[in-house]
Amino acid sequence: MLKIAVSTTGTVMDSAVPAYFEDATYLLIVDAEKDELLSVVDGGDLEPEQRSMYFAYKTVEFDCEALLSGEIEAEPFAVLAEENGVTRYLAAGMSAIEGVHKMNDYALPIIADYMGGTGCPEPDPANCEAHDHGDDSDGADM
């Protein structure tokens, strides 16, 4: 079983993934190999900042390998990436099921840094595999 979390605006697999993690009101826990909805976490009564932290901790609690979402704020990003190594995929504007299928097809970009961040976290460059590698600098000046 490949267990993942998807941040959405609704309780079903056709629900939309919002542009920002904090704008999600539900967290769907999904078996990505079977397209099966395992659980729904409701965060609708919480303020957006509280909800995004709640969903980050729930993603970890459910032992999810990945999160499909919109852009992620700094604090929940740290919970997901730096402390627990959850892979984050950008699926904003898609339905949950569409995002799951694209993730399975390796067609989603990885969220390599928090919203407004300056780039890859220094202590763990492995989290930056999808970061822009256009910078070919190797520290040597030409």
Image (tube, rainbow, N blue to C red):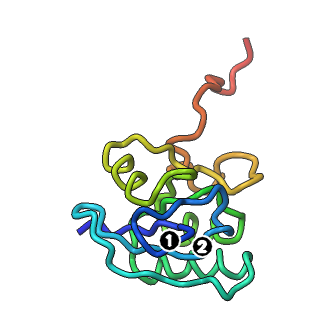
Q: Which one is nearer the viewer's eye here, 135 or 16?
A: 16
Give the residue number, with chain letter if any, for mark 2.
79
Q: Please, what secondary structure does the residue beneath circle 1 have?
A: loop
| Three-letter code for the amino acid on which mark 1 is drawn | Asn
Residue 75 shows up from this direction: yes
Residue at the image position 46 percent from the left and 75 percent from the top = 11
The answer to whether mark 1 and mark 2 are in CB contact below 8 A is yes
Residue at the image position 50 percent from the left and 81 percent from the top = 58
Q: How many marks?
A: 2
Instruction: Give the mark nearer the N terminus: 1 vs 2.
Output: 2
Give the residue number, with chain letter if any, for mark 1.
84
Please identify the quarter of the rendering in which residue 52 is found.
Answer: bottom right
Q: Which one is nearer the viewer's eye here, 132 or 50?
A: 50
Q: Which one is nearer the viewer's eye here, 87 or 108?
A: 108
Question: Where does the image place residue 69, in percent across and percent down from the top left?
Answer: 55, 59
Q: Which mark is residue 136?
A: none
Question: Where does the image place residue 47, in percent across and percent down from the top left?
Answer: 74, 82
| Three-letter code for the amino acid on which mark 2 is drawn | Val
Q: In the figure, 57 relative to 115: above or below?
A: below
Residue at the image position 30 percent from the left and 62 percent from the top = 32
Q: Please, what secondary structure does the residue beneath circle 2 have?
A: helix
